[in-house]
Each structure stands twice: as C-alpha cells, then as structure tokens.
Amino acid sequence: MMIIMKANATPQQVEAVIANIKDAGLNVHLSQGVEATIIGAIGETHSIPLERFEGLDGVDLVQRITKPYKLASRQFHPEDSLIPLDGFHVGGNEIAVIAGPCSVESRSQIIETALAVKEAGASALRGGVF
C-alpha cells in the first residue's frame, strides 16, 4: 500500500501515519523526496481498508500497489536507482556494459578476459564461480 502525503504535511503527521501503519502490523518504507513524501505500508494489506489511512491528517492519497516488486516499482519509487560501482553508476542514464566469462576457470583466463573486456570499452568485469 502506498500513502502519499500532502506537500505541506508536517513531520508529526508523517509520524502519525507511520505509527498507524505499525499498529496495523505492517512494515514501513519511507521515501522523502523534494516534492513528495511517500510512505509504503509493506505486508499483507489486502484486508486493511484504505479508509484507515485516508482520514489521517496530512494524507493526500492512499493507493494499493498491485504490481510485483513493490519497492522497485516506479509507482512507489519514481526516481532512478543508482548503484555506485568503482567510478561509475549502474542505473540512471548511464549504460553499464558488464562482460566476462560464465565460469572462471583459471587466473590466466580471467586476466586475459579482463584485458579484452577493458579494451572493448566495458564498464565492469563479471565472472561466474561454482
């Protein structure tokens, strides 16, 4: 469940919503952006009426999230996820080319592959280990 707070919601109103979510036996995921504060109620929300949260001060919208991968969903997390990786980021506008063998069989093989991957312009090296 996603609870979008009004732009002028106070910290006390946000905390009251969080307390209500916890009282319902749910976990909380707080996302405070520049323009909006979104509170995720994580858990079995299907039996909890939306009205439980809609009437709380500072709440703008309460919406069920029906998509899988709720925490990664654009519906809940509209910003790009950026994962720093040794001088570049995976995600956002950058294209991360990551290459390497399915299985690392020897030291010489991975070094030779690493040099070829770097020369080809890839951002990172990967290798499977079993």
Image (cartoon, rainbow, N blue to C red):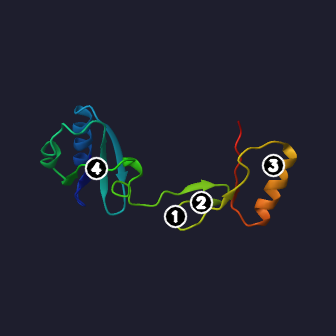
Q: CA distance from mark 1 to mark 4?
A: 23 Å
Q: Is residue 54 above or below residue 122?
A: above
Q: Residue 87, located in which quarter of the rendered image?
A: bottom right
Q: CA distance from mark 3 to mark 1?
A: 29 Å
Q: Is residue 34 above or below residue 68?
A: below
Label pair 4/2, CB-CB below 8 angstroms: no
Amino acid residing under circle 3: Ile
List x then y, in percent, for residue 51. Answer: 12, 45
Residue at the disc numbered 4 = 65
Q: What secondary structure is found at the residue carrying circle 4? A: loop
Q: Which mark is residue 119?
A: none
Tell me: 68 left or right of 50: right
Q: Earlier in the sequence, mark 3 or mark 1?
A: 1
Amino acid residing under circle 4: Ile
Task: Tell me if residue 87 can be seen.
Answer: no
Residue at the disc numbered 2 = 89
Tell me: 2 left or right of 73: left
